[in-house]
Image (cartoon, rainbow, N blue to C red):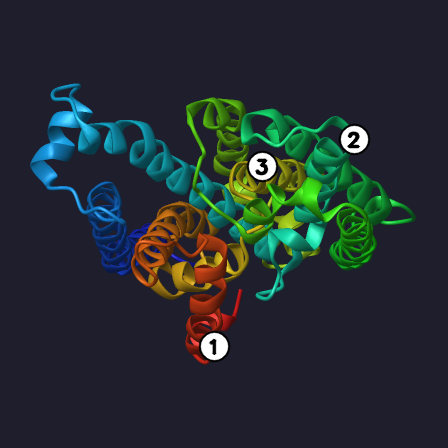
Amino acid sequence: MADPHRVTLQKSAGVVASRRHRRPALRRRGAAVLVVVAGLCLLIVVSLCVGARDIAPSVVWDALHGIGAGEDYRIVRDLRVPRTVAGVLVGLGLGIAGAIIQALTRNPLADPGLLGVNAGAAVAVTIAVGAFGLTAPTAYVWFALCGAGLIAALVYLIGSAGRGGVDPVRLILAGVALAAVLGGIVTAITLLNPDAFAQMRAWNAGTLVGRDFDVLRAAAPFLGVGILIAALIGPSLSALALGDDAAAGLGASVRRTRTLSIIAITLLAGGATAIAGPIVFVGLMVPHAARWLVGTDQRWILLLSGLLAPSLLLVADVLGRLVMRPAEVPVGIVTAVLGGPMLMMLVRRRKVVGL
């Protein structure tokens, strides 16, 4: 018979060793978060200062505090501050939504657009422009949010039909099929009356230009609720990455986690798409970088994805202002150009590809 005192000592030694093993990983993750936060803060300053007309940081500081008057102060307060806030909000939504859908489907190539969110928003905006003549972002943002939500709900119903409840494979297939159909509908409608949809071209390309605080206030509550849900399901997503049986054995509710994940993806990606239009590669690429930096714990991946994606979007937006100055390239085009090579570099790392 084993000595109880010895068994207790062995268990205590194991706990101490486990804690010692976790400390370096925790310090590394904390350091990664601090570096990314510092980089994001720097990029926010750059976004406020750099553009077709460069503005000194001192002028930006005064403008943020309501001091001064003139063209530079107006540009900062009325144009660049809303644009920068929009970049941060859109990045938050796309980054966290991408991390959730990759964990949910256990597919490192999954993207929020696979659930038909982008296509649903595009159809709704097309209807708003074509049927109601709404061309201002503040007017069609609600259509985009409703369209994203309705299509995501339809995809969820199709993906959960049949035995076994929600199936990640059926979800993706349903999303891809509906997105293809809706994309054809949007193209057909816009070709019937190209002049009426001239205002929609920038939105379709993905842009942060002209997004004032009225647009941001409309979408921000959806993004906030989505972020809250993502924080609540983080531990369950880590369990779900091990498989349904293992997750259930660890006490996670598979059905509840999947349902909440779909809701969070819809709110986050739908809110981001409503603000800036369909922006590709951000939700696909950023979670790979997050896994490379912090490992496979979904709580840390969600946190870092929510910081890296706004950083990437601000970098793309600033580059779009500079490459053809004084003209601008929409941020969605820049992310598409940057995303391909960066994603290929990331997925070559075996450590990053695994979920």
- Counting residues from the start of the chain, the first of labels 2 and 3 encountered is 2
Amino acid at pointer 1: Met
Residue that numbered label 1 is attached to: 344
Query: Crowding at label 2, few (<14), some or many (≥20) Cα neighbours within 10 Å?
Result: few
Q: Secondary structure at mark 3?
A: helix
For label 1, the SS is: helix
Q: Relative to 300, is 230 on the left or the right?
A: right
**Mark closer to the observer (1, 2):** 2
The answer to whether one can see residue 42 in this image is yes
Residue 1 showing in the rendered view:
no
Q: Is residue 126 above or below residue 218?
A: below
Q: Nearer the viewer, residue 34 or 186?
A: 186
Give the secondary structure at mark 2.
Answer: helix
Marks 1 and 2, the one that precedes in the sequence? 2
At a point 48% along the width and 36% down the height, the residue shown is: 231
Comes first in the chain, label 1 or label 3? 3
Q: Which mark is residue 315?
A: none
Q: Residue at x 52, y 52 (%)?
A: 99
Residue at the spot x=68%, y=30% of the render? 143
* Three-letter amino acid code of the residue under disc 3: Ala
Please say if 162 is above or below 344: above
Quadrant assignment for the N terminus: bottom left
With 277 as the anchor, is 35 left or right in this view?
left
Mark carried by residue 131: 2
Residue that carries the numbered disc 3 in the rendered image: 274
Would you identify the image quadrant in which residue 75 lies? top left
